[in-house]
Image (cartoon, grey):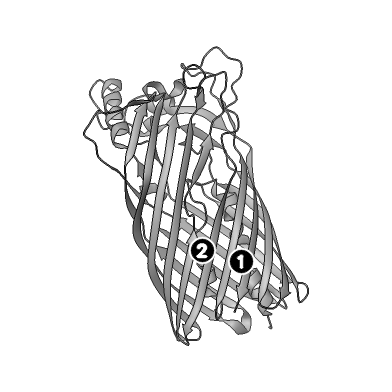
């Protein structure tokens, strides 16, 4: 079975489109692929991805905090966003390779519009809706050792920055209506390691990559309606971005055609955000709610389970210059009910990619992906506290029949 080099490279169009589906699971955004590092010889790539999700729901009509309004629509709370990736791989010796990968692995861009029901927006004082904005950046430095042409062992360090802000608005937020937190950018380091096997004769390539969690200490400015919130001594907010495992596999199935599989696990179940002053106020709230039987408070954001996703696709080379691929993806989500800040629960997607090679050593690729987002119930952090009726009161709205579109553009150069 002979597979042309053009086809071997074009299979990585669709990972560019990862963020079209990432909105279905927590803050996972780029997919943290290392496939560029497994290219032959020297290689550079850069890409841009744009995601346009549409996520809206209906406020539950039996909520006691619902104002006298016939409009139960939450409005579209998911903002469009874009992000960038770049990678450089150098074969610095016959058995040693070096790589740099830049990506934006985790992010959030949510903003509820003003609605007359006042459930998740404040039409009286701040004239704002509940919102969240999280940005992160990674630079991964990898060294690979190839003891045999078929094997590649690699490891390296990861430098990561995280910053964000969140606003809670609406009657459903109770005493947290008007809460704002701004998290100053923090940097920290982690690591990754993996191994790959390839057999060029049959276009077989398989890789497993582990990335560690990365701990951050974020300085947070917390306020209520613009007034400083100081219920306890000042301290940083500790978070750990999740550890993950990526599995990548491809093989030739017949002439000029390859099948591929990308799978990913992300440890969102152990991820929590509880800013210091928010946590102190939540402890007061739960103490009063439970009449002193529970004083532990709750998190600003967390998840009920880990995320799994998988993409299965086929790529085919039609001419010396043109190739295309198509795939189907599935995402497990991170539990239902889900956070008000990301009221989605996994789903299914379908994508199409196309690549043009003006010359054998460089290419331009593009892709489009449509994603059916799974139905979810939006809840706040009080859902998990051990107080009778708390779970029901924490459920604000039902989000159904939502979707997302993703668009990607990528260039690659071999030298």
Which residue is located at x 66 percent, y 69 percent? 10
Work out whether residue 337 can be spotted: no
> Looking at the image, which is closer to me, 325 or 377?
325
Q: Classify mark 2: helix, strand or loop.
A: loop
Where is mark 1, residue-wise? 12
Q: Position of residue 190 (x, y in %)?
A: 35, 61
Q: Which mark is residue 33?
A: 2
Which residue is located at x 60 percent, y 25 percent? 73
Quarter occupied by the N terminus: bottom right
Task: State left or right for residue 58 relative to residue 339.
Answer: right
Q: How many marks?
A: 2
Q: Report, in whole angstroms, how far the alpha carbon at label 1 lies from the one at label 2.
A: 10 Å
Task: State left or right for residue 356 relative to residue 387.
Answer: right
Q: Position of residue 344 (x, y in %)?
A: 53, 40
> Looking at the image, which is closer to me, 133 or 248?
133
Quarter occupied by the C terminus: bottom right
Whether label 1 touches label 2, CB < 8 Å: yes
Work out whether residue 86 can be spotted: yes
Q: Is residue 141 above or below residue 332?
A: below
Which residue is located at x 49 percent, y 43 percent? 108
Q: Position of residue 180 (x, y in %)?
A: 40, 31
């Amino acid at each position: 079975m002979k597979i042309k080099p053009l086809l071997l490279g074009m299979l990585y169009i669709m990972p560019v489109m990862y963020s079209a589906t990432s909105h279905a699971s927590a803050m996972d955004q780029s997919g943290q692929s290392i496939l560029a590092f497994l290219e032959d010889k020297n290689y550079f790539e850069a890409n841009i991805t744009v995601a346009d999700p549409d996520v809206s729901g209906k406020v539950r009509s039996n909520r006691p905090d619902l104002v006298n309004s016939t409009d139960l629509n939450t409005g579209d709370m998911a903002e469009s966003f874009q992000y960038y990736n770049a990678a450089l791989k150098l074969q610095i010796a016959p058995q040693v390779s070096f790589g740099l990968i830049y990506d934006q692995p985790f992010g959030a861009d949510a903003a509820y519009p003003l609605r007359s029901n006042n459930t998740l927006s404040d039409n009286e004082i701040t004239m704002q809706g509940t919102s969240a904005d999280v940005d992160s950046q990674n630079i991964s430095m990898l060294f690979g050792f190839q003891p045999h042409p078929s094997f590649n062992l690699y490891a390296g360090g990861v430098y990561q920055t995280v910053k964000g802000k969140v606003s809670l608005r609406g009657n459903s937020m109770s005493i947290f209506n008007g809460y704002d937190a701004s998290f100053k950018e923090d940097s920290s380091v982690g690591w990754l390691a993996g191994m790959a096997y390839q057999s060029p004769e049959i276009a077989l390539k398989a890789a497993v990559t582990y990335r560690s969690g990365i701990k951050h200490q974020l300085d947070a400015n917390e306020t209520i309606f613009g007034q400083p919130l100081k219920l306890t001594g000042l301290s940083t907010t500790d978070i750990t971005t999740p550890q993950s495992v990526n599995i990548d596999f491809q093989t030739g199935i017949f002439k000029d055609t390859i099948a591929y599989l990308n799978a990913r696990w992300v440890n969102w179940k152990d991820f929590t955000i509880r800013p210091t002053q928010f946590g102190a106020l939540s402890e007061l709230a739960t103490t009063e709610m439970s009449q002193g039987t529970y004083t532990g408070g709750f998190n600003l954001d967390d998840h009920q389970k880990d995320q799994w996703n998988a993409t299965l696709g086929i790529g085919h080379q039609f001419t010396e210059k043109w190739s295309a691929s198509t795939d189907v993806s599935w995402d497990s989500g991170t539990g239902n009910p889900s956070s008000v800040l990301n009221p989605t629960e996994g789903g299914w997607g379908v994508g199409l990619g196309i690549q043009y090679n003006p010359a054998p050593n460089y290419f331009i690729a593009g892709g489009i992906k449509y994603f059916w987002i799974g139905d979810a119930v939006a809840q706040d952090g009080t859902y998990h506290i051990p107080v009778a009726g708390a779970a029901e009161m924490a459920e604000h709205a039902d989000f159904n029949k939502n979707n997302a579109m993703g668009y990607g553009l990528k260039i690659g150069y071999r030298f």
